[in-house]
Amino acid sequence: MKCFLCKSNVEDKPTTFMVDLENCIVIVKNVPSQVCGQCGETSYNNDVAHRLEKIVNDMRKAVTEVAIINYADKVVA
């Protein structure tokens, strides 16, 4: 697969996804990703992107200020 920004090769490797929801910062570790070896651009396949969206939406109701989740451990219905 090629990077959509610089057209260099990408490699599959786990990364960390972070988002600030105003009331909570969500950190998801060990997310399956495609990372460009040249420019560092990170992308996700559709299944991973949908699962990240579900995790983030679930955490919008969190009472905590920081949530750290291991992607492989998070059960999503």
Image (tube, rainbow, N blue to C red):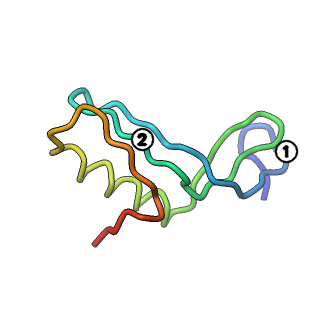
**Would you say 33 lies left or right of 4 here?**
left
Image location (x, y in percent) of residue 19:
39, 35
Please determine whether, in this image, residue 20 is positioned above or below residue 45.
Answer: above
**Mark 1 and mark 2: Cα distance apart in space:** 28 Å
Question: Within the image, what quadrant is residue 11 found in?
Answer: bottom right
Residue occupying the point 78% across, 51% down: 10
> Disc 2 on helix, strand or loop?
strand
Q: What residue appears at the point 42 percent right and 64 percent down from the top-left corner?
A: 73
- Look at label 1 and name its amino acid: Ser
Residue 8: mark in rendering: 1
Residues 58 and 45: in front is: 58
Marking on residue 29: none
Going from the N terminus, do you reach mark 1 or mark 2 first?
Answer: 1
Front residue (pair 63, 6): 63
Label 1 Cα neighbours within 10 Å, binned few <14 / some 14-19 / many ≥20: some
Quadrant of the image occupied by residue 52: bottom left
Q: Quadrant of the C terminus?
A: bottom left
As drawn, the residue found furthest toward the bottom would be 77
> Is residue 23 toward the left or the right of residue 16 in the image?
left
Residue assigned mark 2: 27
Numbered disc 1: secondary structure: loop
Q: Residue at x 68, y 38 (%)?
A: 41
Q: How crowded is mark 2: few (under 14 residues within 10 Å), some or many (20 or more)?
A: some
Q: What amino acid is found at the position of numbered circle 2 in the picture? A: Ile
Which of labels 1 and 2 is toward the front?
A: 2
Image coordinates of residue 21 in percent, x first then y, are 28, 33
Q: Which of 52 and 64 is in front in this view?
A: 64
Residues under numbered marks 1 and 2 in contact, where contact means CB atoms less than 8 Å apart: no
- To which quarter of the image does residue 32 belong? bottom right
Q: Residue 24, image x and y in percent?
A: 26, 33
- Residue at left 38%, top 44%? 68
The quarter of the image holding the N terminus is bottom right
